[in-house]
Image: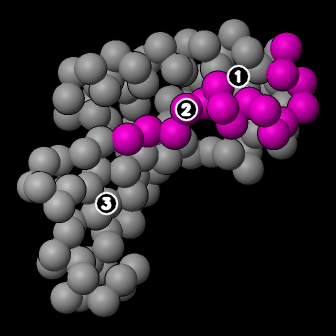
Amino acid sequence: MLTRAIIVQVNEVLASKGLVAPEEAAKRPYQIIGFCNPPNAHKALQAEAGIGLLLPCNGVVAVAEDGCVEVALVDPLAMLGIVLNKDKLRPIVDVVREAMTKALAAV
């Protein structure tokens, strides 16, 4: 649902596929998801080539100890602090952050 709401899923890493020991993965399923909105990524790359180090955006889907599913996404505004040309990137980051907020609210 998250990737449908925003974006194109670029990659995924499943803890059960070698990131941790299989017995640990069975206790607490954990999935790292990389996702990207190609038009916004293109605009960001035009504003600052170094932004490629931060793409794709990352998210996590995990099952907590109490059995609840947790979904978390990196805050692109927080990541803005480590790149140059912040003024050019800020409008793009605001659009991406709003889309991510809406996607999380829909989960």
Residue 54: x %, y % from top left: 68, 45
Q: Circle 2: is it few (<14), some (14-19), or many (20+) Cα within 10 Å?
A: some
Look at the image and give the residue range highlighted in magenta: 72-87
What's the distance in space between the residues labelled 1 and 2, CA to CA?
18 Å
Note whether residue 89 is visible: yes
What's the distance in space between the residues labelled 2 and 3, CA to CA?
18 Å
Q: Secondary structure at mark 2?
A: loop
Q: Residue lying farthest right?
A: 84
Indicate whether residue 21 is drawn in magenta.
no
Left or right of 105, for residue 56 = right
Left or right of 54, for residue 103 = left
Q: Label 2 is placed on what type of residue?
A: Asp
The residue beneath circle 3 is: 31
Q: Label 3 is placed on what type of residue?
A: Gln
Q: Secondary structure at mark 3?
A: strand
Sooner in the amino-acid sequence: mark 1 or mark 2: 1
Q: Which circle marks residue 75 in the picture?
A: 2
The residue beneath circle 1 is: 43
Q: Can you tell which quarter of the image residue 2 is in?
A: top left
Residue 55: x %, y % from top left: 63, 45
What's the distance in space between the residues labelled 3 and 1, CA to CA?
28 Å
